[in-house]
Amino acid sequence: MNDLGEFISRESISVGKKIKLVSYFPNLIETDSRTICNGSVFVAIKGDSFDGSKFVGESLAKGAIACVVPESGMDFVSEDQLDCCIIVEDSILFLQNLARFWRQNNQFKIIGITGSNGKTTSKELIKHFLQSVGRVAATEGNFNNEIGVALTICRIKSEDQFAIVEMGARHRGNIAFLVGLADPDIGILLNIGSAHVGEFGSKQALRETKQELFTSSRPEMVAICQESDRQTKVVAERKHPRTLTVGESEDATIRIVDISPHQMGFKISLFYSGNQITVDFPYFHKSLPEHIGFVMAIAASLKLETDFSSFSWSRYKAFPGRFKAIKGKKALVFDDSYNANPESMEAGIESVLFVSHEKDCTFVLGDMLELGDTEVSEHERVGKLMKSKNVKQLITVGKLAKSIGDAACDGGPMKYHHFDDVDELMESCEDIDFSPVVYIKGSRSVGLDSLVKRLI
């Protein structure tokens, strides 16, 4: 408590005389005035198109016990409100330093996750397992940037034993900065694909940024990565004596030795340290066996192998927008609409063909954004996959997605429709004869979730 008071005094210009600090002060932090309730602490952040300082009065009226206000926002604070305000030079920097302070003064284990695909799926799987052995906190929504990770850390409770923190990146140095905030005990680099390559300028720049999870963390951190990504494995092993890998190779620490699909899902056999463990999972996706392997690696890192081997996954359910199967009005809808990049789209296509036994399916595919100079060729690549799988019906949405259709229909029979945007698709929805199985995927801004709602 004294340390917290010293931290706030050190980081602030002034502290209102009505503010009473509590030991769990960081847990009370909110940056959105709409979520303020009685007992909250509002941190006013200024962005390109908004200034949180304008909402100090509203936040106090809703019951906030304190407001953290940047010096630049003082014009929006009345004299009588100053007693409830902590004035700082930079409120974002204050939030980030508070996260570092909270992390350094608590004993919870932090698991940092980054990668091009599957961060949320991996986070939820790890969370589902760890909740069977202790208290777990985890990133909410897409809080995986410099502000979101700081908020996530501040919201971890002292009594939590584990915290799973997603780390996203748009530029070089982003992951290194987030590692500095979270100081993870375990770090997982799931994969390095094409997502956001347009933001980085090249695949190598993206690769090096993701690898900052290993190059910027302390040597004591347990590093986990794909066995098949030899370059990343070398980077991890160079600094981290305890590096675990997941894959089908005999060299993998966690080896996937068998995948047996069945009507309700699949069974996977994992080999680790001389022991074979079988996991029965309630639904199938091409990426899931590796994700289960990553959970096993977490269990091994925490010496929870016995708990993992006896754990039942029967109650795990997919999340909306992430390959969630929904029984619709006339079709089984696979909602994979949350986001898309070439690797995740190809995995989704192959997965739905597998679970539907390659029966008649309609594929609704939207633009994949932020692919830089490769955007046309990457869409064409997906189209060629569609052609090789003899897909019967394809619907594309968006300017870039038309390249999927052009490549898929090149010289082959296929029912094909193209729409410039989702609104045009929705207007024609009643005229489309959808198959008994419908798969929907595209970048989030395409808005294909509206089609999901229409079909269910």
Image (cartoon, rainbow, N blue to C red):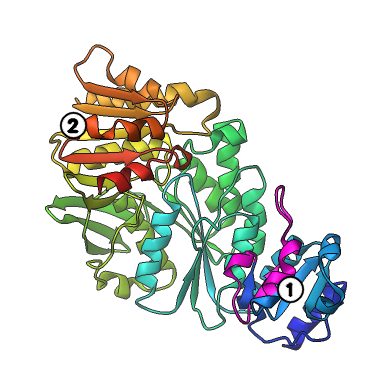
Q: Which mark is residue 67?
A: 1
Is 32 colored magenta in this rendering?
A: yes
Placement of 363 over or under 79, stated as above or below = above
Image quadrant assignment for residue 16 = bottom right
Instruction: Please tell me which residue is depicted at 61% across the width and 35% down the height of the picture.
Output: 200
Crowding near the residue tagged with mark 2, few <14, some 14–19, many ≥20 C-alpha atoms within 10 Å: few
Image quadrant assignment for residue 286 = top left
Q: x%, y% of residue 192? A: 48, 42
**Relative to 151, 231 lies left or right:** left
Q: Nearer the viewer, residue 376 or 114?
A: 376
Residue 248 in sight here: no
The residue pinned by badge 2 equals 433
Q: Which residues are magenta?
A: 31-59
Tell me which numbered mark, 1 or 2, is placed earlier along the sequence: 1
Is 192 colored magenta in this rendering?
A: no
Q: Residue furthest top?
A: 411
Instruction: Please tell me which residue is depicted at 44% across the width and 67% down the height of the picture.
Output: 301
SS of the residue under disc 1: strand
Q: x%, y% of residue 50? A: 71, 53
Tell me which amino acid carries mark 2. Answer: Asp
Placement of 168 over or under 300, stated as above or below = above
Foreground: disc 1 or disc 2: 2
Q: x%, y% of residue 57? A: 73, 71
Image quadrant assignment for residue 396 = top left
Tell me which amino acid carries mark 1. Answer: Cys
